[in-house]
Image (cartoon, rainbow, N blue to C red):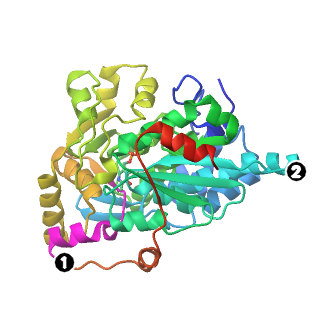
Amino acid sequence: MATLEKAVVKGLAEDRGLYMPEKINKLPQAFFDHIDGLSFREIARNVADAFFGDDVEGEALRKIVYDTLAFDVPVHKIDENIYSLELFHGPTLAFKDVGARFMARLLQYFVVPASAEDGKAAPINVLVATSGDTGSAVANGFLGVDGINVYVLYPKGKVSKIQESQFTTLGKNITAIEVDGVFDDCQALVKNAFMDEELNAHMRLTSANSINVARFLPQAFYYFNAYARLKQCGVLKIADGKSNMVMCTPSGNFGNITAGLFGMRMGLPIKRFIAANNANDIFYKYLQTGKYEPKPSKQTLANAMDVGDPSNFARILDLYNGSWEDIKADISGATYTDDDIRDTMRECYNRTGYVLDPHGACGYRALRGQLQPGEVGVFCETAHPAKFKEKVDAIIGADIEIPERLAAFMRGTKQSIPMSKDFAEFKSFLMSR
Ligand SMILES: *Cc1c(COP(=O)(O)O)cnc(C)c1O
């Protein structure tokens, strides 16, 4: 058992396992009865209180939540019964902004007062491996936060130019490290760093991957908001604490969907979940066979989901006491090739005018294929399509607009440190800091 502070600062437990909340508090029925009258921030504050209220002082927690959610997460109707939950209105145009901004603020709450008391503030070092959007969200979430340094490790040549610009052009307390390898190599370097005694004696390290509870739990906020906004429009059938809302989450490391599953445990009336995968189909296969068999990740169009051994699978297993039957009862799977993704983006654009990004396209397609009569489906549109502009333009045959906050990143200068996938090199680099 560990305090919230320890779980947030350490990231990974001593036994290399993931931290889980000790208990999951249910929210009162009155909250769900009136949720449609609350704003996103008010909803999130209630949810945050249930998760973190015992460990974080009330007004400080309110401020962390309100600062984090400086943007909206609206639902957009696409088909008669299918809605897009637009998670891309934050600073880096992807859902990871929510968790990253929350984590930066919570970490500051825990570590900055302590180090100020010392007189000599030992900086805390955030190590983060990214296959695309994590790096930009974390780097921007922490940019300019005193007493915290961020190291972003990313696979050379495997993230888009736009993604790269969002974490290599920042400078200040953000260092980008370009690893000659794939995402799993980056993740292995980070995990090894946490386990290395000498390195940990040299510097305070913490993780900001989706394994950190302060990053993945706040992602539950917007599932509650999706429910509230659909309830507000009167499109849901709700009775006896149940609803006909189906949530579909495009998944890679499975942090996002796990947060949604926590929401369901807190009483959020979601009927069931769909985990939509690209060609990295480890979870899909698990649902079919009951066997979890990690594989090297495959490169796909939806590259932020190119994960061959999803870290948060362990949390899902734990949440369901290891029961394959219970997991299957709540979650179904889907897996799509790059051709499927292209077809879906084209079909949706031509028929509805809505531009999907390659990740959201997996979610949309899974709802089109699996939604039952009488159900209402919401998929997470996890990133703005302009983040993948070249691909998206070529696929749908259009010239989509680049939002100004994205264009601003692209005007910056790339600064990054080349690194092999060999842990010894990474370690000596960190030892020299
Ligand atoms: C990270 C990411 C995903 C996958 O989310 P997980 O929490 O790792 O399952 C999906 N889409 C986009 C755009 C992402 O950046």
Q: Earlier in the sequence, mark 1 or mark 2?
A: 2
Left-right relation of 190 to 272: right
Residue 412: x %, y % from top left: 47, 76
Residue drawn at the location 67% of the way across and 60% of the way down: 145
Main SS category, magenta section: helix
Q: Amino acid at mark 2?
A: Gly
Q: Which mark is residue 398?
A: 1
Residue 78: x %, y % from top left: 25, 64
Q: What range of the chain is rendered magenta?
A: 379-398
How many C-alpha atoms fall within 10 Å of the one at disc 1: few (<14), some, or many (≥20)? Answer: few
Could one spot residue 396 in this view of the protein? Answer: yes
Q: Nearer the viewer, residue 309 or 335?
A: 309
Residue drawn at the location 73% of the way across and 45% of the way down: 110
* Residue 89 picture quarter: bottom left
Residue 13: x %, y % from top left: 58, 28
Q: Which residue is mark 2?
A: 119
Mark 1: secondary structure: loop
Vertical placement of residue 414 versus 4, above or below: below
Residue drawn at the location 22% of the way across and 30% of the way down: 285
How many C-alpha atoms fall within 10 Å of the one at disc 2: few (<14), some, or many (≥20)? Answer: few
Left-right relation of 111 to 316: right
Residue drawn at the location 60% of the way across and 27% of the way down: 22
Left-right relation of 14 to 122: left
Vertical placement of residue 196 versus 63, above or below: above
